[in-house]
Amino acid sequence: NTLVSLPTGLGKTLIAAVVMYNYYRWFPSGKIVFCAPTRPLVTQQIEACHNIMGIPAADTAEISGKNAPASRVALWKNRRVFFCTPQTLAKDIKEQRCNAKSIVCVVMDEAHRATGNHANVVLVNLIDEAGAKFRLVGLSATPGSGIKEIQNVVTTLRISQIEV
């Protein structure tokens, strides 16, 4: 698992899109998820990832509260690449709409928020508890203001490598 810390505009989304595309190719039945903290950021990342790597739209889905629960079950079953907030994914795992064990890659935008009881923390724990064999790429322009804060994020997200 890797934490990528770069200033805004220097390529975090490019890195995420390339990693997601590689996991899309390497794991034909695995689920790849990009989590961003707000719906506008989710939408922004969908557009950026489509423009950069061209993962087929037929294999991708934006999951949010706007989707009815039954349609979300169908999306989780039939699509491979998902864009959502961590709260939405955690809820879908808890309510058994998403089989967390099928997740092979999580990209977490604004990864520095993974402290305390934040949805990022809950999400990583749920996926881990499900027994998923997954990799996580955390993205943050500001991973923390001190060593303890950064170490907390690194530990919580099970980060083994930091790229600055």
Image (tube, rainbow, N blue to C red):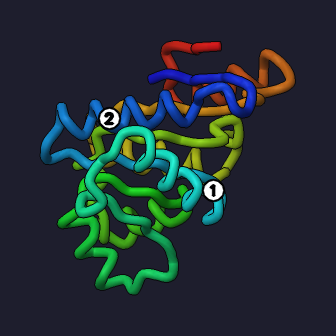
- State which quarter of the image contains the C terminus: top right
Q: Is residue 105 left or right of residue 65?
A: left
Which one is closest to the eye, mark 1 or mark 2? 1
Q: Is residue 152 left or right of residue 15?
A: right
Given residues 73 and 6, the one toward you in this image is: 6
Of label 1 and label 2, which has the lower sequence position? 1
**Is the residue marked by circle 1 packed among few (<14), some (14-19), or many (20+) residues within 10 Å?**
some
Place of residue 49 in the rendered image (x, y in percent of width and height, measured from the top left)? 45, 45
Vertically, is 125 above or below 9? below
Place of residue 127 in the rendered image (x, y in percent of width and height, measured from the top left)? 38, 47
Amino acid type of the residue that numbered disc 1 sits on in the rendered structure: Leu
Q: Residue at x 58, y 14 (%)?
A: 163
Q: Is residue 21 left or right of residue 161?
A: left
Place of residue 150 in the rendered image (x, y in percent of width and height, measured from the top left)? 72, 23
Residue 113 occupies quadrant: top right
Residue 42 visible in this rendered orientation of the protein: yes
Q: Residue at x 36, y 64 (%)?
A: 61
- The residue singled out by tag 1 in the image is 41
- The residue singled out by tag 2 in the image is 134
Residue 157 occupies quadrant: top right
**Is the residue marked by circle 2 packed among few (<14), some (14-19), or many (20+) residues within 10 Å?**
some
Residue 115, disc: none
Amino acid type of the residue that numbered disc 2 sits on in the rendered structure: Phe
Place of residue 89 in the rendered image (x, y in percent of width and height, measured from the top left)? 45, 61
- State which quarter of the image contains the N terminus: top left
Given residues 122 and 54, the one toward you in this image is: 54
Vertically, is 132 above or below 139? below
